[in-house]
Image (tube, rainbow, N blue to C red):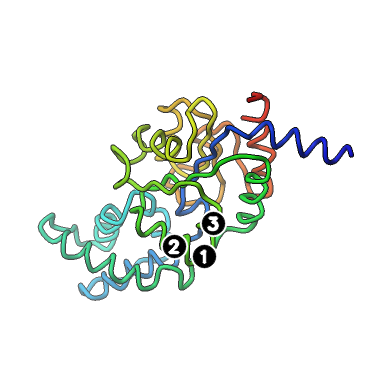
Amino acid sequence: MAARTRAARRGAALSDAVVAFDLDGTLVDTAPDLVGTLNVILAEEGLRPLAMAHARDLIGHGARRLLERGFQAAGEPLPAERMPALFDRFIARYLAHIADESRPFPGVVDALEALRADGARLAVCTNKPTGLSNSLLRALDLARLFDAVVGPDAAPAAKPDPRHLEAAIAAAGGTPDRALMVGDAATDAGAARAARVPLILVSFGYTEVPARDLAPDVLIDHFAELPDAVQRLLGACEP
């Protein structure tokens, strides 16, 4: 009886809450397939591939920015006029290999299912295009867990602009006063702070600035910590 009562209270506490997630580096370790695609493009252009340890932190600002930064790191700045064709090649190759090696980080599925059981609605707020995001989530059997997926093409602007996060929260049926952001990098922190929503960062994502230095409300090292962290930040506010 006591366990059922605690579960009911947890569910009630999050029944009107939205938890928004970044995708690359937060929910899914996509670096193997993103960097793999980047390195294929670099090789086709006669440039040296990038080491994973360096290139993973270039992820998080969208494919165009990844190409720009990747070419710069390979010692060959990318002329603007070449971007459209290279971008199309990148997307075509990446889509064909979107989940070859990409996998959810440990504990992701259990944490998402626990949040849904607690009554929360879940959204993806990512700088990856919406179509690619949906393809990845379907390939990994994660799409079933989300009420909304909002890439930059489905929002007024991309993170760190707060309108991206606000659009994702609204698409999931929530409001910023009962929402929080879970991410891994400065773009997530910037969007959350500008939208005035609580911020949880993971310590294992793709970021040039250490997550701890971005001053999240909570820093987690494993997704097993997430449900309790969400409860601490949102569960105290009853519907």
Q: Position of residue 170 (x, y in %)?
A: 43, 35
Tell me what residue is drawn at x 54 percent, y 41 percent.
201
**In the image, is 99 to the left or to the right of 114?**
left
In the picture of the structure, the residue carrying the numbered disc 2 is 136
Q: Position of residue 115 (x, y in %)?
A: 64, 44
Indicate the quadrant containing the N terminus: top left, top right, bottom left or bottom right: top right
In the picture of the structure, the residue carrying the numbered disc 3 is 144
Q: Earlier in the sequence, mark 3 or mark 2?
A: 2
Graded by Cα atoms within 10 Å as few (under 14), some (14 to 19) or many (20 or more), the crowding at tag 1 reads: some
In the picture of the structure, the residue carrying the numbered disc 1 is 140
Q: Position of residue 185 (x, y in %)?
A: 45, 43
Tell me what residue is drawn at x 67 percent, y 31 percent.
13
Graded by Cα atoms within 10 Å as few (under 14), some (14 to 19) or many (20 or more), the crowding at tag 2 reads: many
Q: Position of residue 190 (x, y in %)?
A: 41, 33
Mark number, residue 118? none
Q: CA distance from mark 3 to mark 1?
A: 10 Å
**In the image, is 158 to the left or to the right of 143?**
left
To which quarter of the image does residue 107 belong?
A: bottom right
**Amino acid type, label 3:** Arg
> Compared with residue 63, is residue 89 higher up or lower down, i.e. above or below?
below
Q: CA distance from mark 3 to mark 2?
A: 12 Å
Tell me what residue is drawn at x 45 percent, y 67 percent.
32
Name the secondary structure under disc 3.
helix
Tell me what residue is drawn at x 46 percent, y 25 percent.
196
Contact check, label 1 and label 2, Cβ < 8 Å: yes
**In the image, is 226 to the left or to the right of 154?**
right
**Amino acid type, label 2:** Leu
Indicate the quadrant containing the C terminus: top left, top right, bottom left or bottom right: top right
> Compared with residue 198, is residue 7 higher up or lower down, i.e. above or below?
below
To which quarter of the image does residue 234 belong?
A: top right
Observer-nearest of 44 and 76: 44
